[in-house]
Image (cartoon, coloured by chain):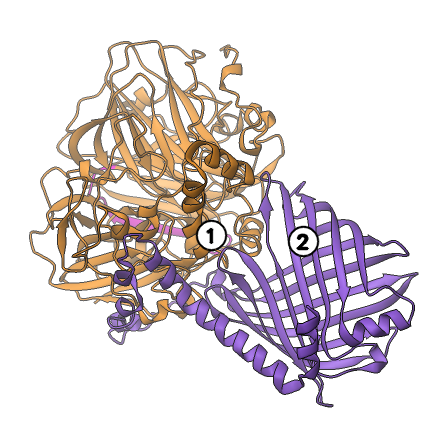
Chain colours: A purple, B orange
Amino acid sequence: MKRLAKVLNKGHIGMVGVVFLAAAGWSAAWAQDDMQAAMGDMNMDGTSTVHGPASASPAVRDPHAYADGYDFGPIPRPHFADERSFTSLLMDRLEWVHTSDANSTAYDLQAWYGRDYNHAVIKAEGDVDSGKLQEARTELLWGHAVASFWDMQLGMRYDSGVDPGRGWLTFGFQGTAPYWFEIDAAAYVRNSGHSALRVSADYELLFTQRLILQPRFEANLYGKEDAARALGAGLSDLTVGMRLRYEIRREFAPYVGIEWVGQFGGTADYARAAGYPAKETRYVAGLRFWF
Amino acid sequence: MKIEEQGSSVVEGESGLSRRRFLQGLSAGGALLGAAGWIQPTWARQDSTLTKGGTAQVLSGTEFNLTIAETPVNFTGAPRMATTVNDSLPAPTLRWREDDTVTIRVTNRMNRSTSIHWHGMLVPYQMDGVPGISYTGIAPGETFTYRFKVRQSGTYWYHSHTGFQEQTGLYGSIIIEPRGGDRHHVDRDHIVQLSDWTDEDPWTVFAKLKKDADYYNFIRPTVGDFIHDVSTEGLSSAIAKRRMWNRMRMNPSDLADISGYTYTYLMNGATPAGNWTGLFAAGERVRLRFINSATQSFFDIRIPGLSLSVVQTDGQNVEPVSVDEFRIGPGETYDVLVVPKDDAYTILAQSMDRSGYARGTLATHAGLTAEVPALDPPQWLSMVDMMGAMAQGGAMAGMGHGGQKMSGGMAMNAAPARHAATEYGPSVDMRVDYPRSNLDDPGVGLRNNGRRVLTYADLHTVGGPLDRREGEREIELHLTGNMERYTWSLDGLEFGQSTPVHFRAGERLRIILVNDTMMIHPMHLHGMWQELQSPEGHFQVRKHTISVQPAQRVTILVSADALGRWAWHCHLLYHMMAGMFREVVVA
């Protein structure tokens, strides 16, 4: 991990960009093709090509050809839910965090408003300690469905807290990877040539229909050092945790969990200089709810 | 009359269902019954044998007045408002006679628009009752007069085609006496109308599915299932069983979008505890007219101890076939003859995902009950449901070269699907390149269950097709969706993105439906019969609603003899409301 951090330390915006575009391209291609690939794989007798992409493209139909030029009649046509907007708010984590030397509160929510394939999205994550917002990331995005399981997200991010604020442009993907990994990955740039990359993944393991273990992973990388926010260049932090929740209702689930957080490179140096440990274990207890 | 102890009918704690749900809500239909004056036709007197709960009034003749209103009901212990006709849930049974011209005045006493569609009836399109296609609907306070000649006979039904009013109670049955007398003499005639009820606002249900498509699914694979499979089948088998599904992000337990977690399943408007009872005298031949008026639930129906002779589907007589069990999709009807000998039999209608059931009793006296069997365990979808023909018959060599003999002895034509260009986007999460076309699969949950289960391959409409022409032109339409986004469409296009489908007046059309999803979709075409073909291309059965199984391809012949504009849609109401709907123009 140190080696990776070192390599990434040398990187600048271009580096992060290349990594991200490669990742984005890979996931988009994956999204398009993994169904076909998966179907092909089905036949364990080696005949996977039967179902391959070759059979998919040549004979595509034009679904509007059946209209023969006819349109809807004089009576205003029906409107169904595909032309209706919905609203959702998911508080994925609202938790009390205990570490060896401090207690704090953390939140992580995502809200959306819109139709099936286009949403306005708000993401907000932060820590509150002693009644004061320590560190927060808030994003306002346009989410557009680009593949069966993937949305592209474009918009703005604002980092706030005790340190000086930072505004970013966001370009990201959110969706479900094969084997049900929920992925949220975004690249960020701001005018001073700074860049950032954030990737998170989580998974759900059902012990019962209501008792669910959710392992979670998150990494943040920065293209350049930002001393004012005590961030080094390269891999800044990694979080690996798991939360065990009980869905009293689908929308309402208390949980407990444990999380390991490590800071790396320059960010770790800043932490140590300020008298904080670069690595720590957190115990969390909280609520997951949505409506 | 005293009802016997019904403790045996109570399933406790299964699939999140509470004892309370089964024990309460006994009386809604019955309590409503006295509210309106009703006509008891002499020739329908044999029907008045119901004991408690869910008795719809029977109206007969040629002139009808129906009033749609909101009426309080209580099925679960919590009072709710239902959408009713003449204060009745189910709505009144209408008895018509073939060749009569009927006039039905429908008055809207609600503060929102409504409609009534005559499901399966061949009527002029202006009388078909679909807002936005046939007419503008029936506005608050307005009376709309339907008038049409009854050109057919058999068991049909009617329901609202507006919003979620079908979910909130607006459905009733139609029985049409054939002009030449009934093909089967029976001593008793009972309607068995099945439905699903939720205390939730249907829009709330829909919104929940948009946010969490598995919201109502409490049979998802768990770690415990995996450990169980490892211990019984070995690790590699347990992994193999899950690998495909997980890789494709598909859920093998996705049998029903909405389950008994919120649904109370009703039989003639009575809850399982309400135990609708149809009477008979020993030795009598009884006709049971099963109608699935549920919005989102398939039912698997059996009457333990009785052989079911299926004589009609969707109002069309079929060559009688004896089975132990049959599956009925929303919109479909089946007439069944039974000759009960004992005092009491349970009519069990399990929901397809086994999260609950509707239940009633056939008995010689009110108050008698028979044992209610335990629910069958839910089964996972199989590879056939995902892969179609690719999963049938083992070796794939030669696939794509047309017909081949399958391992089960079925001759199967593995025709490749022709996907629409619009299926390659976010609206579609699965495409089947080589769908299966056999009709002899009873479907998930009924395969190899030790009982004789009806399939479409068993159904042969008496008298053959109405039109002997072969299909002159072909239209292929794919049933599509994205389960995680909870979007449902045809050819990957929701209704809002679609254009009408043109049928040329007078043509005999071959329609190919390919199900590119892992759910069964009951496809209903308004105004014209759908004549289902066998895989070999012979006439099979005439229906108004055809349930297309996952990864299945069916061929349907339609005579475009009904000028006008018609609806064509999935009869799972929540799928229709998501946009799995087309307008058809016959011109």
B236 in relation to B417, above or below: above
Picture quadrant of residue B51? top left
Q: Is residue B145 a member of the stretch shown in magenta?
A: yes
Residues marked 1 and 2 touching at CB (< 8 Å): no
Q: What residue do we see at 81% from left, 71% from top?
A: A268
Q: Amino acid at mark 1?
A: Asn
Specify the label residue B246 is tagged with: 1
B326 in relation to B508, above or below: above
Both marks 1 and 2 on one chain: no
Residue stretch in magenta: B138-154
Does the rendering let one see residue A45?
yes
Name the foreground residue: B38 vs A41.
A41
Q: Is residue A124 a member of the stretch shown in magenta?
A: no
Q: Position of residue A280 (x, y in %)?
A: 81, 58
SS at circle 2: strand
Q: What residue do we see at 55% from left, 48% from top?
A: B205
Q: Position of residue A27 (x, y in %)?
A: 50, 70
Q: Could you tell me which quadrant the C terminus of chain A lies in?
A: bottom right
Q: Which residue is denoted by mark 2 in the rendering? A: A290
